[in-house]
Amino acid sequence: MSEPTWAGHPRGLATLFFTEMWERFSYYGMRAILVLAMVAAVDSGNPGLGLSVTEATAIYGMYNAAVYLAALPGGWIADRLIGQQRAVFWGGCIIAAGHFSMALNWPPLFFVGLILIALGTGLLKPNISALVGQLYRDDVGARRDAGFSLFYMGINIGAFAGQLLCGFLGEKIGWHWGFGAAGVFMVLGLIQYRIFGAHLGKAGLHPARSGDAAHDRTVHRRGWGVVAVFLAGLVTLTLLALSGVLSIDAVRVAQGTGIAIVLIATAYFGYVLLAGGLSRDEQRKVGVIAVFFVAAAIFWSGFDQAGSSLNLFAQTHTDRSVFGWEMPASWLQAVNPLFIILLSPFFAALWINLGRRNLDPSLPVKMSLGLVQMGLGFLVLYVAAGFVVQGDKVAPTWLILTYLLHTTGELCLSPVGLSAVTKLAPARYVGQMLGTWFTASALGNLIAGLAAGHLADETSVAQMPDRFLLIFLTTAGAGLLLWLASPYIRRWMGNLR
């Protein structure tokens, strides 16, 4: 009897597709209104936390960075202690608890909720992707690629729908309604996951085992000990902060975290290059990964302005009136996943067709194109900000055009960069090098949060055009430098393209 399939793929793919779709619904739905809720006045018609823009955007940057950084221990916990299937389920439970904590409309629980969502996403996100790969363990051809394409379609459908519904509820009814809806849909995803989880079979059901029972028990015991110590420390710090014993300056913490990430990344690449036992060819390829790390951090520092400074730009400086009804500002966040859904097939076909004609750009050139398009998006906003300085509100088309350029830039840089790391990394460092890619995203998100505090500062609107212009010059300039260096980088890459 043949294996049951879903659209020609393992039935387990449908289980993971809908789990990830609802998880991304909750994640992006909450994120679309996060900064807006933090800066809303406590005595307004829709009461928020009343934080300054600088504080709110710094917290937003730290939260996003924590999500990416948590993916590293999340993968380790699944591999060593509980397996991917349990990691996905318990990660989803922690995420839902975080959303419901934020929905209770009590400031201390709001921040506890952010911590829970970051921890839960770190458990769920890397491991659900690993499960997709395990469903195709014996299939490395086009069927596997098509399966991942379907899976990523679910991500963007969830992100699109979540930002529309949670954005509407949060802005038009109450912020806690938007956060609560995110939790409800995460629970729906978990229910679906439990009902149809049998379709996953043995994929990721158990943690990795060495074959030595005594050694495995030792690893298991020590692993849980590390987890317990970490959680105890995190709970202690959280309680001290919430009680006022420990004073936390969000901006300084974000700045310090960013500096720490830069130092750790520099030390790590330096160690691998100088003391990692690599051949000359491997050293060159790791050097390329380091260059791509910097390029990715710069890209995400611009891209992730979407949920912070650009969201506030949409709320304050954009005319959102549609036939007399004011559209929620957060709805413009849904433009990116919509463009991803529409444009991904085009870009996939474009690279294939260019490759057939020997015109496919090299990896560094594609990444440079991503950075240049990111910069052009901010050049559009530089022009729009000129009207804002004159006291006008601008049409949503300015932001839509910016998001279009950012999306095409993302499609040039993000999947290409991830693929490049897997190709370039020495075999014994693949997992760690993939970790550096997530670390670059974390660093970019931190920078984005810190920069957004200046971009969206309503006390210095007159400086807004110059600040958008500076981001254009920085990101597009980095793209131009990467393009100029691409012939040398290609030589370091050897025969990889």
Image (cartoon, rainbow, N blue to C red):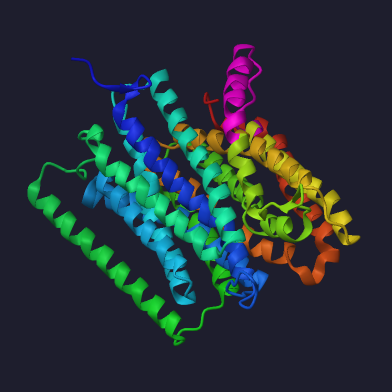
Query: In percent of the image, x 56 and y 64: which residue is there?
Result: 174
On screen, residue 482 above or below 119? above
Q: Which quadrant holds residue 90?
A: bottom left
Residue numbers of the magenta segment? 340-365
Q: Quadrant of the C terminus?
A: top right
Q: Residue furthest left?
A: 214
Q: Is residue 312 left or right of residue 67?
A: right
Provide residue 189's location: percent of width, then percent of height: 36, 45
Total numbered circles: 0
The percent position of residue 167, horizontal first and vertical second, equals 58, 54
User: Image quarter for residue 193?
Assistant: top left
Q: Position of residue 164 (x, y in %)?
A: 58, 48
464 vs 48, nearest the viewer: 48
Furthest-bottom residue in this view: 245
Q: What is the residue that sits farthest to the top in this orientation?
A: 357
Q: Is residue 49 above or below residue 79?
A: below
In the rendering, at what x and y percent does residue 293 appear?
Answer: 56, 46
The residue at the point 49 percent across, 60 percent down is 179
Q: Quadrant of the N terminus?
A: top left
Regarding residue 18, the answer to whether it shows in the image is yes
**Hey, which residue is sitting farthest front in the picture?**
324
Q: Is residue 71 visible?
A: no
Q: Is residue 54 magenta?
A: no
Question: Of residues 385 and 133, which is closer to you in this image?
Answer: 385
